[in-house]
Amino acid sequence: MDQHNFSSLTEFVLLGFPNVEYIRSCLFVLLLLVYLFTIGGNMLIFLVIRLDAALHKPMYHFVSVLSFLELWYTATTIPKMLANLLSEKKTISFAGCLLQTYFFHSLGASECYLLTAMAYDRYLAICRPLHYPSLMTTALCVKMAAGCWTCGFLCPISEVILVSRLPFCNYNEIPHIFCDFPPLLSLACKDTSTNVLVDFAVNAFIILITFLFIMASYGRIIGAVLKIKTAAGRRKAFSTCASHLIVVLIFFGSIIFMYVRLKKSYSLTLDRTLAVVYSVITPLANPIIYSLRNKELIQAIKRTFFKKVEKASPTHH
């Protein structure tokens, strides 16, 4: 088919959730509150861990990096979602759509690698406690975190390049809440089986391998915890990992179903729902799980902020 039969699209229209006109204002307020809580919670965790010397440990180093990552991860999609809820014109430029897709997948891949690094850290701490201080050094923590970011930002490059070369028809409406590979492929005016196959290979490599590594680490951890003789010891050892495991299961459960598949889409409604889970719910759950379930972090928040408030308040004689 002649390439000139296709229009060179300059923008797309993000349809978002259909049939929400009557509750659009409520959805905007709800999403805004969720976003503000996500930013505030993750920023609080990041600052407390950076400022409190008692939390300068490998586990909290990775938690702070995760919180920092979530700030950017949500910034790629939620502000545009909020703008679209207020605006009648829900457009995004072609370049902006590709950039949103690239950064969303880069940060998502970085999170996969980071959660794997956190699982490895917990494995060493519980299964090899005597060697842990000499193995998990500050230098290694920094190198692992940098490696997670670097690998994450390299992974989606091939997918973005392939999508950017696709011809698109006159129909420019994306049936999704943000730009992503599956809905973009559904608008292309040529066979996209190569794109689907590359997407599947890249996503299967990133998501399945990291998920299997995490599950293998936790299998070893559970085995080691069960060997601890005292109930208090078992409880303490597993409580440090339970919060991490909850984040892993929520995040990986949704992205495996969404991205490790050889079909463009199973159901538009299901795709949108899953997108809310891994783009909104998981970043929201991160500060809730890591702060409310962690006594050491709660105490650090009190030390960092409440003591400063007390010092700032005038003393009465």
Image (cartoon, rainbow, N blue to C red):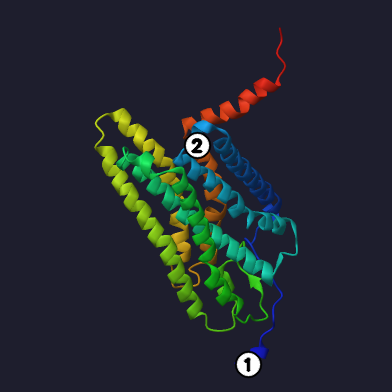
Question: How far across and down, in percent of the image, does residue 57 sit?
Answer: 46, 38
The CA distance from mark 1 to mark 2 is 61 Å
The image quadrant that residue 232 belongs to is top left
User: Relative to 230, is 100 on the left or the right?
Assistant: right
SS for dot 1: loop
Q: Which residue is mark 2?
A: 56
How many numbered discs sit on the rendered protein?
A: 2
Q: Earlier in the sequence, mark 1 or mark 2?
A: 1
Q: Is residue 272 visible?
A: no
Kindly indicate whether the residue at mark 2 contacts the one at mark 1 (C-beta within 8 angstroms).
no
Label disc, if present, on residue 78 of the rendered structure: none
Q: Which residue is mark 1?
A: 2
237 w.r.t. 113: above or below: above
Question: What amino acid is labelled 2 in the image?
Answer: His
Question: How far across and down, in percent of the image, does residue 104 sit?
Answer: 58, 60
Q: Residue at x 47, y 35 (%)?
A: 293
Question: What amino acid is labelled 1 in the image?
Answer: Asp
